[in-house]
Amino acid sequence: MYFISMAVKTITIDLAAYETLRRRKRHGQSFSDVIKERFRGGATGATLRTALDHIAVNAATLDATDTLIAARKRSPARAPKM
């Protein structure tokens, strides 16, 4: 029988960071999974292209998206600055 050993490190985080991780953690996920999901290298252009090849977007959907984007640009509403 073979065991694969993973190196581990202990880190210290404050309670606010812990609560943030805990809220994002889904059933069956480890905290390491949550951190890796958030911080691992992002998708590449090739990844996006592959995903787009598998979905069908018609002209009406693209037109509606353009209309929505234009409307948002005209809207005076802005996110609050914190």
Image: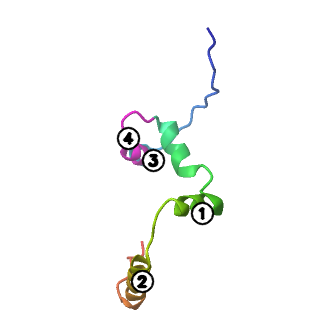
Residue beneath the point at 41% across and 48% down: 20
Q: Position of residue 70 (x, y in %)?
A: 42, 88
Q: Element under label 1? A: helix
Q: Please tell me in which quadrant of the rendered image residue 79 appears.
A: bottom left
Q: Measure the alpha-carbon separation of dots 2 and 1.
A: 20 Å
- Give the answer, above or below, for where 9 lies relative to 18: above
Q: Please tell me in which quadrant of the rendered image residue 43 appears.
A: bottom right
**Mark 2 Cα-neighbour bin, 10 Å: few <14, some 14–19, many ≥20:** few
> Which mark is on residue 49?
1
- Give the answer, above or below, for where 12 lies relative to 1: below
Q: Amino acid at mark 4?
A: Arg
**Mark 3 Cα-neighbour bin, 10 Å: few <14, some 14–19, many ≥20:** few
> Which mark is on residue 26?
4
Residue at the spot of label 3: 17
Residue at the spot of label 2: 63
Q: Amino acid at mark 3?
A: Ala
Give the label, 1 or 4, closer to the camera: 1
Q: Amino acid at mark 2?
A: Asp
Give the label, 3 or 4, closer to the camera: 4
Residue stretch in magenta: 20-29
